Amino acid sequence: MRYEVLTRCQFIPRSWILDELIERVEKKHEREILPQIMKLALNPFQESWEWNAEEEERLCGDVPKYKGMLQCSCSS
């Protein structure tokens, strides 16, 4: 059952996505992306979020090879 749920899930907030999100918001001041990412995170089983189809596909698709082993760190 758990496997079936994961295979239907379209969006999984992986570490490379979170790392990119932190960089875009903190360093590039692209705060407008936050509501869109929240839509994806709160509704991960939707087929589409009526946002930016290319960006949705990139964030929901395979992990880019150059970002495959990234890990978010906690700066406390």
Image: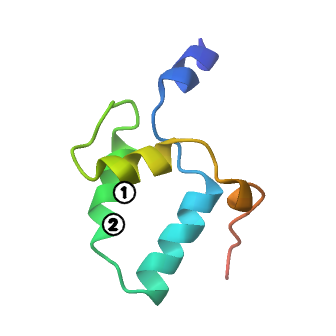
- Residue 65, located in which quarter of the rendered image? bottom right
Which residue was labeled with disc 1?
37
Which residue was labeled with disc 2?
34
Amino acid type of disc 1? Answer: Ile
Residue 31 vertical position relative to residue 69 in the rendered view, above or below: below
Residue drawn at the location 21% of the way across and 44% of the way down: 50
| Outermost residue toward the right in this view | 69
Amino acid type of disc 2? Answer: Leu
| Outermost residue toward the left in this view | 50
Residue drawn at the location 32% of the way across and 77% of the way down: 31
Q: Does the residue at mark 2 contact the one at mark 1 (Cβ under 8 Å)?
A: yes
Residue drawn at the location 33% of the way across and 30% of the way down: 47
Q: Observer-nearest residue: 47 or 55? A: 55
Q: Secondary structure at mark 2?
A: helix
- Which quadrant, please, contains the C terminus? bottom right
Residue drawn at the location 71% of the way across and 72% of the way down: 73
Calculate the distance from the C-alpha at mark 2 to the C-alpha at mark 1.
5 Å
